[in-house]
Amino acid sequence: DSTRPPPQELAPAEVDAQSESARKDGEQRLAAAERTGVLASLPAVPVSALVKVAPKLRVIRLENLGIEDLPCLDQELPKLTQIWLSGNLLKELPDPIPFPRLERFDVSNNVLESLPERGWEELTKLRELNCSHNRLALIPKALAHLSSLRVLSLSHNFVADLPPELGALREVTDFDVGNNVLLEIPEQLAGMRSLRRFNAE
């Protein structure tokens, strides 16, 4: 449209003002996360600042933000009890998993192609694990160490075989592995004696 005026460029002073505003906002969000232990938005701060605050976090709730990488997950987070990272672009998780107090772990709707092989035995408090809607083809047998697990969702992936070791998950009540490419269901899953809902369709 020839009648439309050309877009106006911001003056350098305006760009600087916006950058300063973003910096202050990021610092305030980070301070709030440090104070409350809850990271519910990704502040515009240097990675080093986020990593410094991370050990104080109890909850990370960063959903539907298109995050490809979250550096603070690569360190020991001793207070962390909940991670909600659904709807991002994560390709991998730290190996081993360094969150010993974790109770809820949601990494659904990402682009994960594998899960860590190590560290699951340390997650003695984990009750809910949601890895649905990813690109997983293999499920590590080490998930069988999740002694407190109640809910396990692996639906909408590319899983052909389930580790028979999962039958050791005695406390699981809800197991969803639907919308995969399963060839068979291991008979050992009968060991899931608390199971109330099982979906493999």
Image (cartoon, grey):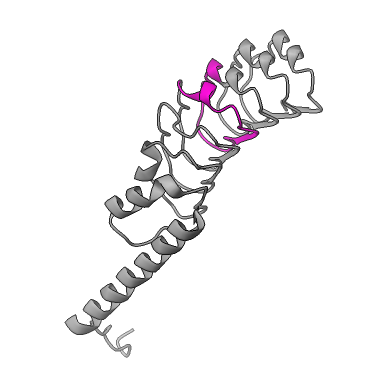
Q: Position of residue 143 (x, y in %)?
A: 57, 21
Indicate the quadrant where residue 10 lies: bottom left
Residue 127, image x, y percentages: 65, 33
Say which residue appears at 66% left-offset and 27% top-offset. 148
Is residue 73 visible to the viewer in this orientation of the structure?
yes
Residue 41 seen: no
- Residue that sits furthest to the left in the current view: 12
Kindly identify the residue that appears in the image at 35 percent across and 66 percent down.
Answer: 27
Q: Is residue 146 magenta?
A: no
Asked whether residue 137 is drawn in magenta, I would say: yes
Residue 140 shown left or right of residue 197 in the figure: left
Q: Residue furthest top?
A: 187
Q: Which residues are magenta?
A: 118-142
**Is 155 placed left or right of 33 in the picture?**
right
Provide residue 86's location: percent of width, then percent of height. 54, 46
Identify the image quadrant of the N terminus: bottom left
Residue 172: x %, y % from top left: 72, 26
- The answer to whether 131 appears left or right of 184 in the picture is left
Viewer-nearest residue: 119 or 187: 119
